[in-house]
């Protein structure tokens, strides 16, 4: 049996990062977590790091402001997974990864780098509306740096996180389902893809020692979770035994709402437009440059949308 790669998780205390750390430990990888001095007095993050240590992870000192510390951290492992935030309503730090790329280049030992992606495939979003396009543009800057440095990579396209999309019945700014009403995007029939965050972490870890995913994009498209907003709503209605009052938001009205929002919300509105009006998550076939996670790893018993919604009943 081949020895499992040593994994360094950068952003390991974040929303997805903490799940990746747990999945890495559970899958038997020697797991390292970057301990950045920038967390300062954030006691919750400190305690989370200590809990990882108790589970067997090693904490490694390193800062994006200290190149030598990053190089030293990188030299201790085989694979790096970066999960720093790429959403504007939290902290948007995608381009910090360029410093990580420089450290990986100098260290020269990394077998695989998984940068912070985990959403829509940015290579397919060159047409994206501003200001939402900034997310995709910056991820492509990082990809360009990785590929120009000949760093082996895997890009994870995880589509819609269930926590942020399914809980609120796909409504922007909602994460708990209403038992009274719902606003549909147009007719609500455009298909999207919903993936539980713990499943994203597990699929991610499964790719790192898999030759089939080397230098490819892995799309996480669990077949039973390729659903329209209307189908998500119907699943909720069945669970609560009640039909919700439905209103429809036209494409024109949705787009016109962008100008009245703050910048972070404008980014989100633009993304939701592409997901639920354009159908950017499902309007293409995966080609030779990609793989689909649930086909590669059929042993993963992924969470269904209905099962996620049951938590709210």
Image (cartoon, rainbow, N blue to C red):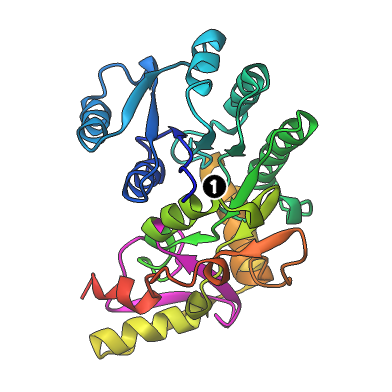
Query: Which residue occupies the foreground of this view, 124 or 210?
Result: 210
Please identify the quarter of the rendering in which residue 164 is found: bottom left
At which x and y percent is residue 265?
52, 47
* 123 to 137, vertically: above or below: below
Q: Which of the 4 image quadrants contains residue 50?
A: top left
Give percent across and percent down for residue 82: 51, 36
- Region in magenta: 170-197
Q: Which residue is outermost to the front?
A: 1
Q: Is residue 174 magenta?
A: yes
| SS state under label 1 | loop
| Residue 211 image point, x, y percent | 64, 52
Q: Is residue 144 magenta?
A: no
In front of the other: 113 or 225:
113
Which residue carries the number 1 mark?
208
Q: Residue at x 44, y 63 (%)?
A: 165
The residue depicted at 30 percent of the width and 16 percent of the height is: 40
Q: Please tell me in which quadrant of the rendered image residue 36 appears.
A: top left
In this view, 62 is above or below 90: above
Vertical order, 95 against 183 (above or below)? above
Question: Relative to residue 88, is residue 311 depicted above or below?
Answer: below
Disc 1 residue crowd, few under 14, some 14–19, many 20+, Cα 10 Å: many
The answer to whether residue 39 is left or right of residue 71 is left
Q: Determine the residue positioned at 74% across, 56% down.
A: 124
């Amino acid at each position: 049996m081949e020895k499992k790669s040593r994994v360094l998780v950068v952003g390991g205390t974040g929303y997805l990062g903490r799940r990746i750390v747990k999945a890495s430990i559970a899958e038997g990888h020697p797991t390292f977590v970057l301990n950045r001095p920038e967390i300062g007095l954030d006691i919750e993050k400190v305690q989370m790091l200590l809990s990882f240590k108790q589970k067997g992870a090693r904490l490694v000192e390193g800062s994006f402001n200290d190149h030598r510390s990053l190089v030293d951290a990188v030299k201790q492992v085989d694979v790096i997974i970066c999960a720093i935030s790429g959403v504007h309503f939290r902290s948007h730090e995608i381009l910090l990864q360029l410093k990580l790329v420089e450290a990986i280049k100098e260290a020269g030992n990394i077998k695989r780098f998984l940068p912070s992606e985990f959403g829509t495939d940015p290579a397919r979003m060159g047409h994206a509306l501003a200001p939402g396009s900034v997310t995709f543009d910056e991820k492509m800057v990082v990809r360009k740096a990785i590929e120009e440095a000949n760093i082996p990579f895997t890009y994870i396209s995880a589509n819609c996180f269930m926590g942020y999309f399914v809980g609120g019945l796909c409504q922007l700014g909602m994460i708990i389902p209403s038992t009274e009403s719902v606003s549909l995007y147009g007719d609500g029939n455009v298909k999207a893809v919903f993936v539980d965050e713990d499943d994203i972490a597990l699929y991610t870890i499964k790719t790192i020692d898999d030759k089939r995913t080397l230098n490819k994009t892995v799309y996480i498209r669990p077949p039973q979770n390729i659903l329209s907003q209307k189908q998500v709503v119907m699943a909720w209605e069945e669970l609560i035994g009640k039909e919700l009052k439905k209103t429809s938001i036209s494409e024109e009205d949705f787009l016109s709402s962008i100008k009245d929002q703050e910048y972070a919300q404008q980014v989100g509105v633009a993304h939701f437009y592409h997901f639920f009006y354009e159908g950017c998550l499902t309007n293409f076939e995966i080609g030779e440059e990609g793989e689909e996670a649930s086909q590669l790893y059929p042993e993963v018993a992924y969470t269904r949308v209905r099962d996620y919604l049951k938590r709210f009943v």
